[in-house]
Amino acid sequence: MDFAGYDPAGGRPGRGIVSAKIVVAGGFGVGKTTLVGAISEITPLTTEALMTAAGVGIDDPSKVPGKETTTVAMDFGRITMAQDLILYLFGTPGQTRFWFMWDEIIRGAVGAAVLVDTRRITDAFAPLDYFENRNLPYVVALNRFDGAPQYDLEEVREALAISPQVPLVMTDARHRDSVKQVLVTVVEHAMLRLQSEHGRGFPTPVG
Amino acid sequence: MDQRRADPRGALVRPYAVTRGRTEPRQDIALEAVLTASPTQVAESRFAGHDKHRIATVCEGRAQSLAEIAAYTRMPLGVARVLVADMVAESLLTLHTAAPAEGFEERMELLGRVLSGLRRL
């Protein structure tokens, strides 16, 4: 790797190691951890957040019957890009009742990829609804499962009512290059969004 | 300053025993914020208790995010966050900035670096 072009201090004294994160969302069993594992330099780790009865009260206690505490697991991976730059990939907890946790996961994120399984396309409605109502740039990635029905991307866009501005790509979550392309799409989309929000129009996409 | 009484959740949550019942960190630390510990900090952490020493050891020689610290020490995230925030305040860990959320130029520069980092993979 060549970091010769980088000035780690960048004229901003005190800046140390910078980290960024991309969120991988989607229904249960859609391949989020597979996707993270395909590109992470570490075997995906799991961290557990403890949700207490008191904490549930903020959300909806009736959805967690007979439990005072429960744990929500999220899987994540890491890509060390430079001595001073680390990218983390966080998978969202699958069950929709844990959405209050997503807010913490997406805070400060570069963007998100919503994974869709064409065999259970309706599972994508909830995560898509979630991101439509947040200001986070996201892309939709169709995870190609063996033997799953093959749809045209535009058919899927229509079925899921994905707005034309949202990039839609095909992927194989098991393959590093394919996952890399999804992540590149997320970052490019985030850059375009940021630029347009900043009122600088849409310059030529990078690369 | 008895937060066990001030915070009604304290009584319910046994895993927070290691934080003496405190569930609110001194400082909010993002999941992906990275921390490091120098050999001196690791040595000093021995006097701060077993859990803090474990955390310092995890961060020695390799920057680790709050999420990684929680995973490697098998602590629930909230517990790790309270201890890590304490350790930053006690100078037992060095907190590095997470992605700067504000400032167009800074944000674009970061995204650009992430993009080229991905392309190099």
Image (cartoon, coloured by chain):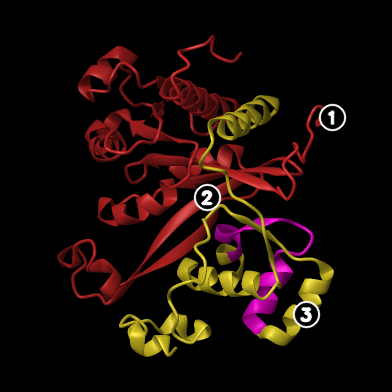
Chain colours: A red, B yellow
Give the residues drawn in magenta, as a range.
B50-69
Q: Distance between the residues labelled 1 and 3?
A: 36 Å
Residue sitting at 52 percent across and 50 percent down?
A: A76
Mark 1: secondary structure: loop
Residue A122 in the image: above or below residue A14? above
Q: Is disc 2 in contact with disc 1, using a CB cutoff of under 8 Å?
A: no
Observer-nearest of A41 and A167: A167
The amino acid type, in three-letter code, at marker 3 is Glu
Q: Residue B117: which numbered mark, if any? A: none
Where, by quadrant of the figure, is residue B85 drawn? bottom right
Q: Which of marks 2 and 3 is in front?
A: 3
The amino acid type, in three-letter code, at marker 2 is Phe
Residue A102 in the image: above or below residue B55? above
Mark 3: secondary structure: helix
Q: Which residue matches tag 1? A: A4
Across and down, in percent, residue A92 comes to 40, 48
Where, by quadrant of the figure, is residue B24 drawn? bottom left
Whether labels 2 and 3 belong to a single chain: the reply is no
Q: Which residue matches tag 2? A: A76
Q: Which residue matches tag 3? A: B44
Where, by quadrant of the figure, is residue A164 drawn? top left
Q: Confirm whether the magenta stretch covers residue A188.
A: no
- Local crowd at mark 1 within 10 Å, few (<14), some, or many (≥20)? few
Prevailing SS of the magenta stretch: helix
